[in-house]
Image: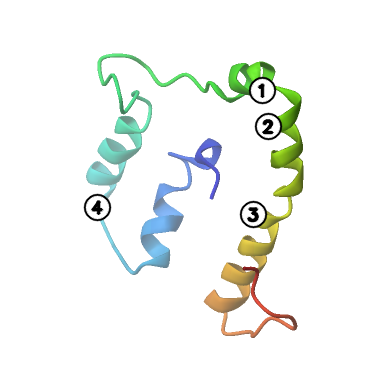
Amino acid sequence: MDYEELPAALADVLSHFGVTVDAERLALMESAGHWDAKSPTLRFVPDGPGKRAEADERLRAAAADMADVVPRWRRRATTASVGVKPNRPAPP
């Protein structure tokens, strides 16, 4: 899961693991997701675009080489959660 999907996806994540919480607790957890984990007095601000802008060509090439890892993992996780075996070996 991408962090951009949080905190909105929290209920789905909890449900996936069989965890139930009341609406009040869920709202508190979702609210906490709007704060910066490293500096909890500050609102969370995504810093991905800035970090990508700072990346040099070597880092960009390495990232491009790994670009299909997350989609492969998601396919594997999705098929595993519904009991379907993938038709190819799992990624290394």
36 relative to 63 in the view: left or right: left
60 relative to 33 in the view: left or right: right
**Disc 1 + disc 2, Cβ < 8 Å:** yes
28 relative to 70 in the view: left or right: left
| Earlier residue among tags 4 and 1 | 4
- The amino acid sitting under disc 3 is Val
| Earlier residue among tags 2 and 4 | 4
Quadrant assignment, res 48: top right
Mark 2, Cα crowd under 10 Å, few <14 / some 14-19 / many 20+, is few
Q: Is residue 40 above or below residue 92?
A: above
Quadrant assignment, res 17: bottom left
Q: Is residue 57 above or below residue 9?
A: above
The foreground one among 41 and 64 is 64
Q: Is residue 18 above or below residue 11?
A: below
Front tag of 4 and 3: 3
Q: Secondary structure at mark 2?
A: helix
Residue assigned mark 4: 22
- Picture residue at 53% right of the left edge, 41% below the top: 5
Image x and y of residue 45, in percent: 47, 19
Q: Is residue 20 above or below residue 86?
A: above
Q: CA distance from mark 4 to mark 1?
A: 43 Å
- The amino acid sitting under disc 1 is Ala
Quadrant assignment, res 89: bottom right
Residue 59: mark in rendering: 2
Residue assigned mark 3: 70
